[in-house]
Amino acid sequence: MAFLAEGIPRGDSFPLPVPGLRHQGVNSALEGERGEEAASPISPIPPLPCRAEDLFPFSLGRTERSPGRCIGVGVKAALDKPFPYLNLFQSQQEPVWLHLTGPLLGAPWETAVLFFSAVRHSELKCSSSLAAAGPSFFRICNADTDGLMSGGDMAKPLLGHGSTEGEPSITPVAGRTVGVLGSGDFARSLAIRLVCSGFKVVVGSRNPKRKAGLFPSAAEVTFQVEAVKKTDVIFVAVFREHYSTLCDLADVLAGKILVDVSNNTEINHHKESNAEYLASLFPACTVVKGFNVVSAWTLQSGARDGNKQVLICSNNQEAKRTVAEIAQVMGFTPVDMGCMASAREIENIPLRLLPAWKIPTFLALGLFLCFFTYNLVRQVIHPYIRENKNKFYKIPVEVVNTTLPCVAYVMLSLVYLPGVLAACSQLYYGTKYRRFPDWLDQWLQHRKQIGLLSFFCAALHAVYSLCLPMRRSHRYQLIEMAVKQAVEKKMNIWVEEEVWRMEIYISVGIIALGLLSLLAITSLPSIANSLNWREFSFIQSTLGFIALVISTLHTLTYGWSRAFDENQYKFYLPPTYTLTLLVPCTVILAKVVFSLPCVWQRLLRIRRGWEKGRYVKFILPSATGEYSSGETSSNV
């Protein structure tokens, strides 16, 4: 049951109603139009005043302190941030439990909690202090649960966390005792996170007196045997080579859930995964692979400062569900990866070094080496051979600065070239259901990385360009030019055409760099998730193509008329910027062709499912009569 409060300005006060988990008499109080309080059919207690800005979003969690289904009640106002999500869990024989998750519970949360205190004149009891961190559970005593989960939609979990028919009832997760075997950095971070999430933590160590000071005071540090006896879910935070030290605990560990959080030092270092090896050592236990992709820093600082996904796999569905519930209460997003055979792949994930960046990086390095060699021949080798001038000092800055924009420009065009090739393929075959070649498919998947590397090279080009006047060689050249002008008695060296060329060249380059910065920022997941698909497509596609066009103007103003100067062809090699124009101009011309109505309409039909050669043929009777031999046909 979700209530929507519209038209509530920030900072204004509005009454919090007492819905009583009924449909009647709820919406009118939340509309805020007449300012009247809704008459509650459950309780005559007046609503509690609450400032809209005091209600902070709750992290939607799940408690299994009592079996049964849940009812989620969400309150949302027309503000920038949502209102709290509150979960009520009840059964026919158990009292109602209210579960709140989030940061420190203080006065602003107290008002939201009291929102439920008037239900059935129930007494609200808190199982932990309002100042404590992590999830808190509030028991609504003397609640009349009869009719609370009546038939129809009210008998179903509105937020998808209740159990469904055919599934076992959910058992409590938060507040239960969880064991940790190990006393290293990850074990300590895991214990801290579990304690902050409302769990009772028992740490098993071979030397508890020595390690007790490393763990929070709320965690019990004892011997491994004692820790195993006190819990059914145990995190095994030890290295693979130390698994054999736990064999003495095999009898005590029988029937318990072991969560393997270990990783290898190399990809596919062993024939079997660590989780499979642990399962072979303890066949009487249920092993679950999980939490190995989460770092110790993420555990300590919270899920918002790191990867929120926790990959889980096991051959036992109930064990996976239990570990997934724990991960969810801790603030992470559990991802079911299937059976234990997936553990090998899960353990390889933290060991891979930027797997999606290998091809784009090698492509950028290849282009850099090609353009760098080409510029080296033109700017350094040619003067040394033909004019006997030593210009090797240009290699660190000037040659590199001439190479970087070439790489950035070509890489930007390579972002949009696969889209052009894909469109050509769809037009040629007349269908969108034909699979692209593997090389084109891989190319399309790496466009984000190619674009970010293009922005990186463009940013370096801007920095190098700003540093050009700082070089000592540049100062010597200025002094030499001034002395030469004094000797030749030249008073005015102003060239109007060169002044305008440089002004346009710099201005267009700044605009192109700004657009590339916008493209790079919006490609970040945190920014992209805040945009809808149309906004994201407009920035990445439309503005990206505009950035390519402006970059082309930047390149053309740089070259100006020098492409027609024979002195610019060193060793009969054309200027570098003329080579970089080939791919971008091809992409721009193809985009112009695709924008023609006759081409665009056909491409749009194909992308909507139309296929060439797939039509229905109708035979229509001729106009001479129904039984005439003449026939006409129509294709659809």
Image (cartoon, rainbow, N blue to C red):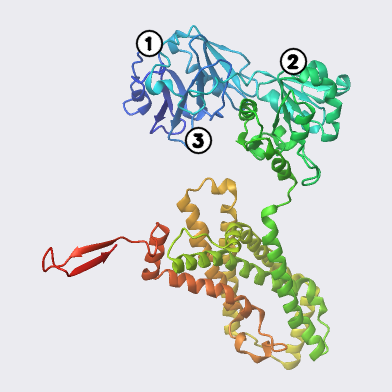
Q: Position of residue 58 (x, y in %)?
A: 55, 28
Q: In the displayed orientation, state which residue is furthest to the left.
A: 625
The Cα atoms of the two marked residues, 3 and 2, are separated by: 41 Å
Amino acid under disc 2: Lys
Q: Position of residue 585 (x, y in %)?
A: 54, 75
The Cα atoms of the two marked residues, 1 and 3, are separated by: 31 Å
Q: Nearer the viewer, residue 19 or 619?
A: 619
Tag in front: 2 or 1: 2
Residue 593 shown left or right of residue 453 in the figure? left
Picture layout, residue 419 above or below residue 51:
below
Amino acid under disc 3: Lys
Asked if marks 3 and 2 touch (Cβ < 8 Å), the reply is no
Sooner in the amino-acid sequence: mark 1 or mark 3: 1
Q: Position of residue 162 (x, y in %)?
A: 51, 24
Sooner in the amino-acid sequence: mark 3 or mark 2: 3
The disc at residue 44 is 1
The Cα atoms of the two marked residues, 2 and 1, are separated by: 46 Å
Can residue 510 be seen in this snapshot? no
Residue 300 shown left or right of residue 332 in the figure? right
Residue found at x 56% / y 61%: 515
The residue pinned by badge 3 equals 81
Amino acid under disc 1: Pro
